[in-house]
Amino acid sequence: MAKPKKRYVCQACGSVATRWQGQCADCAEWNTLVEDAANVVTTFAKKHNLQGGGRRISFVGLDDEVALPARMQTGIAEFDRAIGGGLVPGSATLIGGDPGIGKSTLLLQVAARLAGSGKRSIYISGEEAADQVRLRARRLGLGDAPLKLAAATSVRDILTTLSEEEEAPDFLVIDSIQTMHSDMIEGAPGTVSQVRASAHELVRFAKEKGSALILVGHVTKDGNIAGPRVLEHMVDTVLGFEGERSHQYRILRAVKNRFGGTDEIGVFAMEGKGLSEVANPSALFLTERSEEVSGTVVFPALEGTRPVLVELQALTVRLASGATPRRSAVGWDSSRLAMLLAVLEARCGVSFASTEVYLNVAGGYRLSDPAADLAVAAALVSALSERPIPGGTVILGEVALSGEVRPVAHGALRLKAAAKLGFESAWSPKMSDAPAGLQAAYFERLGQLVDRILGR
């Protein structure tokens, strides 16, 4: 009998190598090759003709009437907003996030809400015992919910049990997919082959039975969902649960959604009774502004269709001649900060050459919107000149390398949300649909904003 050949599978991309090496040749990741039993593949010398012997498929036209899927409302508005309006029966969702961020807590709350509304909800944990999940539910005040719990890691046992039930579950949670094991594939739980095979069987069950399936996935140190990238292609929706342990807020963001958009977010706050919804996210990212302070500016960010007002804080420290100034940005791109400093010096005559610059987005919020350029520039000039921005003012606009202030997307929507929160004036590029009741000051070039702040 021929000795079986060894093979090594990359846990990041799924590529196969005949010998172990420190770095994967395909994805360039280090220490990801793990020995795996080689599958027995039968090869044939001649090619098979695939043009016969199959089952005929039917075609449909683009103009055929198709009923829209009926969504299940979970009762948690922020969760429903992030996934596109509710859970779709027969859909598969993958949610990832850092350890301890609150994935299990959120899904336990969702499952309990659905169970309380009459839906058949099942929560299967591969990392915790059923008693541990039950204790967490009691701590969250969900001990009376008619939710079925189980602790299992065998995919065969899980699917056999679910198939023997009188009715298929409406909502099924698998926590987590890295702990699942299929006896059809050799290898330890968490390997590429096991994760792929286990997810395939669970997704197929959900599609056949019309169950809304949610898989919990571990993340790597870089924040990416662990395992092969093919796992993200197998599911309908990929959600990322973001946040810092030192901050109260959590953001549920859709990275992929076949049944909705990927531009909506759900905002939660971690409290003693679990995750609570935040209907007004701006309250988390705006500090108490009892008095005007130089270097602080309010910017109306946009997450999907929801405006979120955040506070930008800048600090400048003058150094002695000869010292190398430091530039530090938290929650903002450092390269874009360097670009704005260069534009301020080259186009507006404001020099930061002998000044240390520190920029922070309050509340731990992370900005990647170019519409914040004008607000960042205003915060930097205000901190350098020690002239505070007038209270009740929001600033937005994109700054070009020429010093031109360009319009931003959904500017009227941002200003309308600021007006609802009590802001009275706005500094922005010229727009024709500015909301009524808000005093707007329009700027075409960055130098006009600098003159306004410095009182020239």
Image (cartoon, helix red, strand yellow):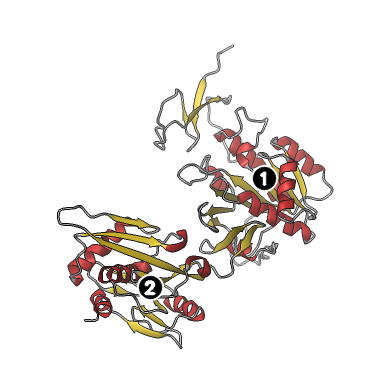
Of marks 1 and 2, which one's residue comes earlier in the chain?
A: 1
Viewer-nearest residue: 412 or 42: 412
Quadrant location of the N terminus in the rendered image:
top right
Horizontal relation, residue 419 to residue 374: left or right: right
Q: Position of residue 256 (x, y in %)?
A: 53, 55
Q: Is residue 218 visible?
A: yes
Find the residue positioned furthest to the top: 1
In this rendering, the answer to whether 78 lies above or below 255 is below
Q: Position of residue 42 (x, y in %)?
A: 58, 25
Viewer-nearest residue: 243 or 302: 243
Find the residue positioned furthest to the bottom: 437
* Disc 1 crowd, CA 10 A, few/some/many (<14, 14-19, 20+): many
Secondary structure under the numbered disc 1 in the rendered image: strand
Q: Quadrant of residue 276?
A: bottom right
The residue that mark 2 highlights is 408
Q: Amino acid at mark 1?
A: Ile
Q: Is residue 250 visible?
A: no
Quadrant location of the C terminus in the rendered image:
bottom left
In this rendering, the answer to whether 159 lies above or below 325 is above
The residue that mark 1 highlights is 174
In this rendering, the answer to whether 431 lies above or below 122 is below
Q: Position of residue 114 (x, y in %)?
A: 74, 58
Find the residue positioned furthest to the left: 322
Instruction: Name the residue located 40 percent from the left edge and 58 percent from the top edge.
Output: 331
Secondary structure under the numbered disc 2 in the rendered image: loop
Q: CA distance from mark 1 to mark 2?
A: 41 Å
